[in-house]
Image (tube, rainbow, N blue to C red):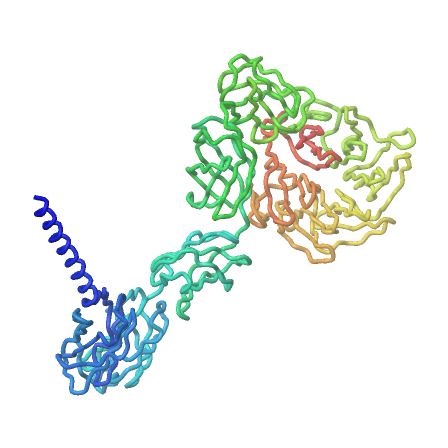
Amino acid sequence: MIIQHKKSLSIGLMLFLMLIIGACKKDKTEPQAVTFKIESYYPNSGNAGTLVTITGTGFGTDIKQYSATIGGKTAEVISATAEALVIRMPEGGTTGALAIKYDTQSFDIGAYTYQDLTITTVLPANGPAGSQIRITGAGFSSTATPATVFINGKAALVVSLSDNLIVAEVPADAGFGAIMVKVNGKEAKGQNFTYQAIDHIKPLTGGKNTKVTIAGTGFEELATGNIIDFNGTAATVLEASKEKLVVIAPDGVKTGPLSVNINGQKITGPTFTVVAPPSIGIVTPLSGPKGTEMTISGTLFSNSVDENKVFINGVSVPVISASANQIKLVLPGGTGSGNVRVVVNDQAADGPQFKDQTLSILSVSPDNGLAGTTVTIKGSGFATTAADNKVYFNGVLAMVKTASENTLVLDAPAGLSTGSLKVMVAGQEALAAQDFRRAGMVTLAGGPNSNTFGAFMAGIAVDNNGNVYVTDRSNNVVKKIAQNGTVSILQANGADIVFDTPYGIVVDKQNNIYVSDIGRNQIRKITPLGQNTVYVSGFSPGLMTFDAAGNLYVNINGAFAGMNRVNTVGGFSKINGPLWPMAHPVVDASGNLYYVDSGAASNNAISYIASGGSNLINWIGFSDPGYVDGIGTQARFNSIAGGLIPYGTGKLIAGDRNNYALREIDIAAKSASTLAKFTSGFADGTLAAAKLGSMDDMAMDQDGNIYILDAVNKAVRKVFLK
């Protein structure tokens, strides 16, 4: 039994060794199969000696292993690479099937026709619609009908033709396919042509480092084969395929067309417009629970939702709607507390801090007012017991009158000033999106039922101490109003100053008061010490203003009488340009004059004379009345009888009388916007609730408060904007 077992083991071992030896012999004698993938061949016709190129991938490179036949006759393989084989057509060959063999593997290539018509080269072998290609070969000429050219089956326009050269224009949407030439009933196929086009790019706007996707056809799959530029500035290709390229806008990118250059062929696409990064203005709310809608206001957002990305504390939050100035989203909860960031086409803007909590302020109405103004706060997480909610206006505590989980009602407290509005409940704090502004209108003096002023007040001014002066034509005096509302008559040396018809009034840096008296054709100067003298005479002066050097610019009272410039010693000269100015003009720090001309624009536009320059009528606004915020002549006013006053740096305020509005003028942008719009009547209150009878002139104190001469209501109104 033991002997038999050993014998079986010996036989098994011998069989195993024989299998291994056989396998080794097989590896040495059988060549490894090569995976051929044949894509195309060209040309498919020609005479003996014509070189036919076969393209593809996975070819063997050992030329000794190849053989080729055409119609059964041997053809010479003259070169072999992994992607191309070149075969020379033999003498005495006949039209037939072209085939190759690599070792034991055989491949049918396609038909080859022996004829005079052949295509040798096509240059370039890629390009966009309208580009030209040069086809070289033989047999192109004909005395019957001219040769025709097709690219992937689409007819191409033949530009020029000889027996050995055709120049043709690439048709639109040619696609990828062979070049074909047909003449005298014969046809010849050349190499494949790659049609290239840019369909669109996205986004169309952005800046440095914006990722741009180029959609089209015929791109190189190797990224380095595509040369991209933005209006001439080279860009880096991040991803590449035949139908899509992803590139990054380069440093120094400028607005202009984007182009793709492949093998020397340039395709021009749409214009890429360079814009500044977005900016975040107001985010509402600055805190809140899951499910709360957030609104982000700002500039340079994209109208395409997918081009805007929002992050809260680094967590991406989907955008539900977007416009150029507003983005909306729904808080997902669980973001944690952190800053709000908006990224538009890879350009980012950081906004305020957001708190991921229950307590939230959604709205404050009104968002401006004076002490005692009833304010309603909407939000979430409020305590239902009024006293458990602490509300602070710029640090001043206000008493909550009524409370629910989503609404608080209270009065703005005494000592109110412009600043943040904060709600505190059970250890949580929530801030309103915007500061609550101490803003609104109060009556400083007078009123429709008061006899403090006459019915025909004309001019108003403020001195450096905050005293207000108005010209009271009906009473032939100038009235002085202290900040506490006390009214007195302007005096000199202890006596009331009596004018014939006081009209315009201004105060210089030294608190000297200048009053234009149209009844006496003179401007009087009253010093702080009470000296009362005639400053200039000889024309009928109306409303007026100073420039930085102390020169007066004075409207001349009368139809189409113009404007005079009065120097610091009382000499005057006519200003070229103004026809019939009636409202308060302004001269800025650079010496540029802004005025309202009844003769040229019916008081409905602001005209402009640059320092040492020419006159520009309708610089902002137009002669037609209306109410439109806009740029240049697109803006509309309805009688700027309230005149013009400086407002901060680079801005003016225009008193739009018949629209009952204070309009802000941005000088650099040439734009008009609305600061406040009142309604007709007489009422103090918030900017939205106040009512006004008329705007006959305006002035501003050093704190930025505006005084409106409301002659219809026989009152001086004070407007708080800050």
Q: Quadrant of residue 138?
A: bottom left
> x, y (%) of residue 180?
24, 74
> x, y (%) of residue 629?
56, 43
Vertical side of 208 occupied by 164: above or below: below
Vertical side of 516 occupied by 20: above or below: below
Q: Is residue 340 left or right of residue 49?
A: right
> x, y (%) of residue 168?
32, 76
Q: On the rendered image, what quadrant is the C terminus found in?
A: top right
Which residue is more in the foreground, 554 or 43?
A: 43
Q: Is residue 281 left or right of residue 258?
A: right
> x, y (%) of residue 269?
42, 61
Q: Residue at x 55, y 13 (%)?
A: 386
Vertical side of 250 occupied by 622: above or below: above
The reply to whether residue 149 is in sight is: no
Vertical side of 276 occupied by 109: above or below: below
Q: Residue at x 79, y 37 (%)?
A: 501
Which residue is more in the foreground, 577 or 218?
A: 218
The reply to whether residue 428 is in sight is: yes
